[in-house]
């Protein structure tokens, strides 16, 4: 058996993917007017293209509690 590059090997049932953590996060991003990403690839592109906004959104999404608020989310914009 050979696999062609880009060939989809498996896809979860719709009810499973719609209830996933990443889909909930994508919905939260849209509801909070941060970014509207249609799929995982779009989320990935945004996360590497706007690193500070991505990490700031995770801080807010997970409601991280800290003694002091963050001033910056990364020391470097390199991934």
Image: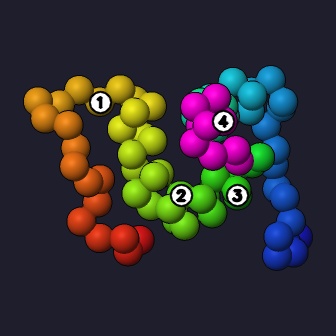
Q: Residues within 10 Å of mark 3 (few under 14, many from 20)?
A: few
Q: How is the image coloured?
A: rainbow
Give the number of the disc on residue 30: 4
Disc 4 and disc 2 in contact, CB within 8 angstroms: no
Q: Is residue 17 left or right of residue 75?
A: right
Query: Where 9 sits versus 18, above or below?
Result: below
Q: Quarter-wise, where is residue 74 in the image?
A: bottom left
Foreground tag (4 vs 3)? 4
Could you tell me which residue is drawn at 47 percent across and 51 percent down? 54
Q: Residues within 10 Å of mark 4 (few under 14, many from 20)?
A: some
Q: Quadrant of the C terminus?
A: bottom left
Q: Is residue 1 left or right of residue 75?
A: right
Separation (CA) of disc 2 from disc 1 = 19 Å
* Secondary structure that dominates the magenta span: loop
Q: Earlier in the sequence, mark 4 or mark 3?
A: 4
Q: Which residues are magenta?
A: 29-37
Give the residue at mark 3. Answer: 41
Separation (CA) of disc 4 from disc 3 = 15 Å
Disc 4 and disc 3 in contact, CB within 8 angstroms: no
SS of the residue under disc 1 = loop
Disc 2 and disc 1 in contact, CB within 8 angstroms: no
């Amino acid at each position: 058996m050979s696999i062609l590059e880009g060939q989809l090997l498996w896809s979860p049932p719709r009810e499973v993917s719609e209830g996933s953590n990443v889909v909930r996060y994508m919905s939260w991003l849209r509801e909070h007017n941060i970014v509207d990403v249609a799929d995982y690839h779009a989320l990935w592109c945004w996360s590497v293209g706007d690193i500070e906004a991505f990490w700031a959104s995770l801080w807010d999404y997970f409601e991280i509690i800290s003694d002091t608020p963050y001033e910056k989310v990364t020391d470097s914009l390199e991934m």
